[in-house]
């Protein structure tokens, strides 16, 4: 993400991020009222140093089903302490005590019956608590906090693109005609390619217009919805933007140019090969909000070189998109965990 434009200029401070698992804590906010009955068991799990697929596999083994039969609202980072929800289909008359899975790295907080399984993206958002260590310029971070409260570019985080951007290398090969038979890996690569194009468009807009300035014509998204419409800037639309009823957006390119403004078509021109490759896949044109506004952003000074940040983000948004506007951070995840990640990734190439 280092090549993407900053909204508030490159930060002066440097810091270490994820020095320990407890330095990156995520609490998934589901926002669903469980029925208390039904064939699906919903599990709230806190995991430490494990990825989402690993926990799903444990749940599947305990329930005696395939890992494909375990669903979850969202993926969570391995390098942290993360609370998230899973669901698995279990016959109504069968009781399984999933707390028997508890270990040093996995803890089942609760299990409840529900009439439907959890689907990807069904959660409201995530709450983050991040500790930054070895901070070189804490005052610069503290000065930036108020600006960042107004919003940052809604970039996809680097984890979307794989280690050293490997998913984007694979995308180029796929668009050049190389077949990828693994459906799951293919989906990851397509998502990475689409996210990459989105990031480039947002970065160009930040450089030329920032995020506060509206263009003559905008494609607006309805808040809380994926619906969008193109319209000229008017007093009515400005009022709706101010109230949060609508949001400015950027394209997630699909099979046609429908829904793109003329300015967006110009920005997309250097990435035409990527757009053509995505278009040939028949993807539906979609939009993603342009500005990411953190909820209840706060900062606590633990000592002269350690800061703790707390904030909420809507689902599908990346904490690193906010973090990069505050500090030039270094991922300090322990080496042995990085090597484990690399081995996991090598196994699916």
Image (cartoon, grey):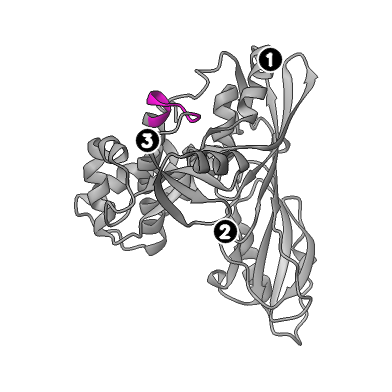
Q: Which residues are magenta?
A: 205-212
Kindly state the secondary structure of the residue where label 3 is placed. loop
Tell me, yes or no, whether the two marked residues, 2 and 1, touch with CB atoms within 8 Å.
no
Kindly state the secondary structure of the residue where label 1 is placed. helix
Q: Nearer the viewer, residue 210 or 326?
A: 210
Which disc is residue 216 wearing? 3
Visible residue check, residue 27: yes
> Which residue is located at x 74 percent, y 60 percent?
44
First in sequence: mark 2 vs mark 1: 2
Q: Nearer the viewer, residue 222 or 84?
A: 222
Q: Position of residue 172 (x, y in %)?
A: 26, 45
Residue with the mark numbered 2: 121
In the image, residue 321 sits, relative to residue 13, either above or below, namely below
Q: Position of residue 317 (x, y in %)?
A: 56, 44
Placement of the N terminus among the 4 image quadrants: top left
Q: Nearer the viewer, residue 272 or 188?
A: 272
> Which residue is located at x 33 percent, y 59 percent?
283
In the image, residue 178 sits, relative to residue 144, either above or below, namely below
Residue situated furthest front in the rendering:
235
Which disc is residue 138 wearing? 1
In the image, residue 139 sits, relative to residue 152, either above or below, namely above
């Amino acid at each position: 993400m280092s090549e993407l434009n900053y909204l508030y200029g490159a930060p002066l401070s440097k810091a270490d991020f994820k020095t320990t698992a407890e330095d990156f804590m995520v609490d998934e906010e589901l926002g669903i009222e469980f029925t208390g009955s039904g064939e699906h068991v919903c599990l709230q799990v806190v995991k430490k140093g494990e990825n989402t697929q690993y926990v799903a596999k444990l749940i599947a083994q305990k329930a005696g089903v395939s890992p494909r039969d375990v669903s979850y609202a969202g993926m969570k980072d391995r390098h942290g302490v993360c609370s998230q929800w899973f669901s698995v289909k279990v016959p109504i008359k069968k009781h399984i005590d999933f707390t028997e899975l508890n270990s040093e790295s996995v803890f089942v907080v609760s299990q409840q019956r529900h009439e439907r399984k959890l689907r990807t993206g069904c959660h409201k958002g995530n709450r983050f608590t991040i500790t930054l260590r070895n901070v070189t310029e804490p005052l610069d971070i503290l000065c930036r906090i108020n600006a960042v409260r107004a919003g940052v570019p809604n970039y996809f985080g680097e984890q979307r693109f794989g280690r050293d951007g490997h998913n984007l290398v694979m995308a180029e090969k796929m668009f050049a005609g190389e077949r990828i038979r693994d459906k799951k890996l293919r989906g990851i690569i397509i998502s990475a390619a689409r996210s990459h194009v989105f990031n480039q468009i947002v970065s160009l807009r930040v450089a030329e217009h920032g995020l506060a300035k509206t263009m003559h014509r905008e494609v607006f998204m309805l808040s809380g919805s994926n619906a969008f419409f193109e319209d000229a800037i008017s007093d009515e639309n400005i009022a709706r933007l101010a109230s949060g009823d609508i949001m400015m957006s950027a394209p997630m390119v699909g099979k046609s140019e429908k829904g793109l403004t003329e300015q967006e078509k110009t920005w997309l021109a250097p990435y035409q090969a990527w757009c053509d490759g995505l278009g040939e896949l028949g993807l539906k044109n979609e939009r993603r909000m342009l500005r990411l506004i953190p909820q209840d952003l706060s900062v606590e000074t633990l000592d002269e070189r350690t800061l703790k940040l707390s904030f909420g983000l809507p689902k599908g948004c990346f904490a690193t998109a906010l973090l990069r506007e505050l500090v030039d951070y270094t991922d300090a995840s322990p080496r042995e965990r990085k090597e484990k990640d690399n081995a996991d990734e090598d196994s699916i190439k």
